Amino acid sequence: MVLKLAVGPMGSNCYIVGCGSSLEAVIIDPGAEGNRIKSLLEKHSLKGKYIINTHGHGDHIGANNALGLPVLIHKLDAGFLTDPVKNLSASFFLNISSPRAARLLEDADVIEFGRLSLSVIHTPGHTPGSISLKMENAVFTGDTLFCGGVGRTDLPGGDEDKLLKSIDERLLVLDDDTIVYPGHGPDTTIGEEKRNNPFL
């Protein structure tokens, strides 16, 4: 099961992905509102196993502390977790600091929980360590690919060429019917973005 809630002032999408048999779950990008996230876990009798951050910006890591679970992030964004300047929260006077990573992720790593697994796809460009997470017919793209848009590259560590290459070579090669769960905004599909995304 995939549960989605928009959290925080920037409406970042937090996803809870749960295994129906074991009731183990991972929380992808808990950006804020830890109590809301906990309530949704409890409502569905899910037990959180890991937090996975698709990248290290403050609007995607803000509730890491509140959930008290092991944090997984790509090795190139690990320094963002504990540095409010790097994770940009200092710019908004929030000074977000997350627990350090319990596991540093790399491309092609597999994250297992219950009977489910997520495959790590390194998709740099928005940040050096941005990742997407592939599961069956779905992909969680963080701030790399949106419905009708792509991630910003004007922030420190951003790289437009790398972002577009990531999307072209790592995401658009997926099946057209693959559901895209982005870091902000509505869901879409790979096929829809191939046909209609003006940035591609």
Image (cartoon, rainbow, N blue to C red):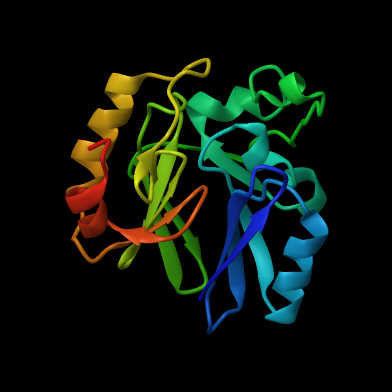
Q: What is the quadrant of the C terminus in the image?
A: top left
Query: Does residue 103 appear in this view?
Result: yes
Q: Does 79 appear above or below 178?
A: above
Q: Name the residue at the bottom extreme.
A: 21
Viewer-closest of 91 and 131: 91
Estimate the x, y position of residue 152 in percent, counting from the top left. 45, 28
> For this view, does 28 lie left or right of residue 173?
right
Q: Does 77 appear above or below 32?
A: above
Question: Which residue: 63% across, 49% down?
Answer: 11
Question: Which residue: 57% across, 43% down?
Answer: 53
Estimate the x, y position of residue 55 in percent, counting from the top left. 53, 36
When asked about the image quadrant of residue 167, the answer is: top left
Viewer-closest of 76 and 114: 76
Viewer-closest of 172 and 28: 172
Query: Does residue 28 appear in this view?
Result: no
When asked about the image quadrant of residue 3, the answer is: bottom right
Estimate the x, y position of residue 107 in percent, counting from the top left. 35, 38
Estimate the x, y position of residue 92 in percent, counting from the top left. 76, 25
Viewer-closest of 70 and 67: 67
Q: Does 151 appear above or below 146?
A: above
> For this view, does 100 lie left or right of residue 146?
right
Q: Does 60 appear above or below 162?
A: below
Question: Which residue: 78% across, 55% down?
Answer: 34
